[in-house]
Image (cartoon, helix red, strand yellow):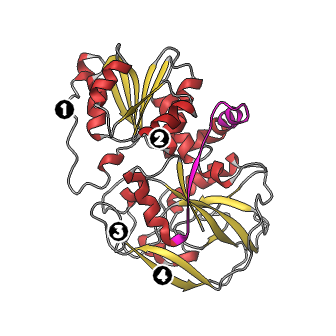
Amino acid sequence: MWATSPESWRDGVRAGPYSHFRRWNSVSRLMWAGGGAPLHTYDHHMSEQNRRLVLAHRPSGLVDEGTTRLETEPLPELQNGEALVKVRFLSIDPTIRTWMDDVASYLPPIQIGEVIRSGGVGEVIESRTDAYAPGQLLFGMTGWQDYVIADTAERAMQVLPDGVSPGIAIGILGVTGMTAYFGLIDVGQVSDGDVVVISGAAGATGSAAGQIAKIKGAKKVVGIAGGADKCAYIVDELGFDEAIDYKNDNVAKRLREACPEGIDLYFDNVGGSILNDCLANLAMRGRVVLCGAISTYNSDGPPPGPSNYLSLLVRRGRMEGFIIIDYLDRFPAAQLEVAGWIAEGKIKSSEHVIEGLERAPDALNLLFSGGNTGKVIVAL
């Protein structure tokens, strides 16, 4: 599955730095089956140069101006079987920050000098393959750069179908929405009558998770978010039953008030003290789904372990992590169900759009400062 050498990842727009996603690519062709016309009109002027942001130094804490370096390289001559894709939108996700660390994980670390790894949506500018037509919008692993080469092998991308906007493709029907879907339904086994708590509830994954919990029959959904505006948003716009403001409330106290009989299912996006507080208020046979630990991603040292973990023993609870790539073969069916909910008005999504490739590092930091509501996207 991870079949390229690190040396090949450095070769720029023609390189296959995302061949780790070969399985993703083959499955995603099913999820976007049906082709699609361009959804927007763009300036089709093509530069002769490719700008790309590469990893210059491994960050300590938040990404700063020394973490990435803007480079320029000539565009390669297009070969038979290839298409040149102008990147239009970048998906900004917390996991990008973890890939910058020199730590073994479910994907190899980004190496110094490599393009920053990320998904995105691009437009076919020129094509020498029947698989992609000029003007089509494609979804796949683009990286933080202006152009990427697509083919039908390791660098395959997926044609967006008619009616699917780039924001929806990157967000609620992409990895973000699928993470919420499988985390709640498969791992958390959400069921009728559950009291569900979601941290990071105003973010892309958390906001989807809370809405899916309501659709699946949860008795009460409580979201934890930062600030009065975000708390109002998840209740008034997304249908959460209650919100806890971690910046201004005593979270442990508010959890006891909001969930007096305990938490049946906690969907954890943040880790840290909030995970600890939720463990302390777990219901009998409660479940904890470990989706992320965004509060710890910029820490220099190891995060403290949850001191309330023995609640899992006393309450006969269960805490389980998951990685979304384990569910790739089930994306098509899940996306059909979520698309139906969108059409019926049962689930909403929002995008926080930042303009300009050079601002991608700032966009990534928004995820850790709480400066975003919904899915963070960089428009190029």
| Residue that carries the numbered disc 2 in the rendered image | 229
**Left or right of 320 on screen, residue 331:** right
Tag 2, which secondary structure? helix
Up the image or down, 296 lies above or below 192; here it is below
Write the start and end of the magenta stretch as one range.
Answer: 336-357
Q: Earlier in the sequence, mark 3 or mark 2?
A: 3
Residue 306 magenta-drawn? no
Question: Three-letter amino acid code at disc 3?
Answer: Asp
**Crowd class of label 3 (few under 14; some 14 to 19; many from 20; radius 10 Å):** some
Determine the residue positioned at 40% across, 66% down. Answer: 110
The reply to whether the C-beta atoms of the residues labelled 3 and 4 are less than 8 Å apart is: no
97, above or below 85, in the image: above
Sequence-first disc among 4 and 2: 4
Mark number displayed over residue 307:
1
From the top left corner, tell me how far across and down residue 105 is, in percent.
36, 53
Q: Which sits in the foreground, 121 or 371?
A: 371
Q: Determine whether label 2 and label 1 are within 8 Å by CB.
A: no
Question: How far apart, in angstroms, are the residues tagged by discs 1 and 4?
Answer: 46 Å
Q: Nearer the viewer, mark 3 or mark 1?
A: 3
Q: CA distance from mark 4 to mark 2?
A: 38 Å
Q: Nearer the viewer, residue 247 or 144?
A: 247
Q: Quadrant of residue 36?
A: bottom right
Label 1 or label 4, whichever comes before in sequence order: 4
> Which residue position holds label 4?
71
Of labels 3 and 2, the one closer to you: 2
The x, y position of residue 360, in whole percent, is 48, 66
User: Which residue is found at the position 35% from the left and 68% from the top?
Assistant: 64
Nearer the observer: mark 2 or 1; the answer is 2
Q: Are marks 4 and 2 in contact (CB under 8 Å)?
A: no
Q: CA distance from mark 2 to mark 1?
A: 31 Å
Q: Which residue has dot 3 on it?
A: 64
